[in-house]
Amino acid sequence: MLTDGLDEPHVGARRGWTLRRRFFALDSFGLLLVMIMLSLTVSALSVPSGAILSVIRTLVLGGTLAFALHTSGARRGAYAGCAAFLVLAVVAASVLDPDSQVGLGTEAIAAFLLISSVLVTVARRFVSHPVVTSSSILAAICIYLFVGLAFASIYAFVAAVDPAGLFVGSSDGTSAERIYFSYITLTTTGYGDFVPASDPSRMTAVTEALLGQVYLVTIVALLVANVGARRRRPAGDG
C-alpha cells in the first residue's frame, strides 16, 4: 500500500523504495527535483534547432509538470487546465516561427500559465503537510526551481513585446540564455554577462531577485530548522 508521505518526518524515510513505488507515490518531490533538472538540461540543448527543439523542450517540460501534478495529488480540474496550456504551447512551438515575436510571445504565455498552475498545485500540497518532513523541504526546493522557470517565461514574453529587446547588445537571447539569466538573478549571483535593456526587464529582474532571497531566508530556513515539528493549526480547526 502506497503512503502519502505525510508521516515520514526523517530524511531517508523512503530509503529502499523502488523507482516504480516512488513514481506512483504522493510527495515524491525528490524524483520531481531530478526531473526538473532534466528539463533544465534539455532547455540548454542547441541541436536540433528551431521548431523541433522548441517542441522537444515543451514536451519534456510538460512531462515534468504532469508528474508534479500527480505527486501533489492534483484535482481533475488542474489536469484539464494544464493539458490545455500544454496543447497551446505545443501548437505554438510547432506551427509558429519560434524566432518571431508572435511565436515567442505565445509560447511564453502558454509556458507561464502551465508552470504557474503546477507551482500553485505543488505549493498547496506543501502547505497541507501537517508535519515538516524531508518531503516538505524537497517540495520547497521544487517550488523555488519552478519560480525560476516561471520568470524565464516572463523574460521570453518581455523579449517578444519590448522593442528594446531583453538584453543589452544581444537582443532577446536564446531559451537557454533566458533560463540562465533567470536563475542567476533568482540566486542573486549576478555575473553581469547579461544586462537588461529596458525598464520592464530591469524591474522584472529586481522582483525575481527579491523574491528569491526572501524565499530562501524565510521559507526554506524555517523548514530546515523545524524538520519533524508538527505545524500549528489555525484556531477553530478540529
Image (spheres, helix red, strand yellow):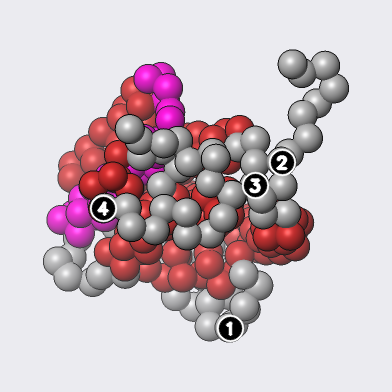
- The residue lying at 85 percent from left, 22 percent from top is 235
How far apart marks 4 and 3 lie (CA) works out to: 23 Å
In percent of width and height, residue 237 lies at 76, 18
Going from the N terminus, do you reach mark 3 or mark 2 first? 3
Going from the N terminus, do you reach mark 1 or mark 2 first? 1
What kind of residue is marked 4? Leu
Q: Are marks 3 and 2 in contact (CB under 8 Å)?
A: yes
Quarter-of-image position of residue 217: bottom right
Asked whether residue 73 is drawn in magenta, I would say yes
Going from the N terminus, do you reach mark 1 or mark 3 first? 3
Quarter-of-image position of residue 23: top left
Q: Give the residues in magenta.
A: 51-78
What kind of residue is marked 2? Arg
Q: Mark 3 points at which residue?
A: 132
How dense is the environment of label 4, judged by Cα within 10 Å: few (below 14), some, or many (20 and up)? Answer: few
Q: Residue 230 carries which label?
A: 2
Nearer-the-camera pick, 12 or 98: 12
Q: Are marks 4 and 3 in contact (CB under 8 Å)?
A: no
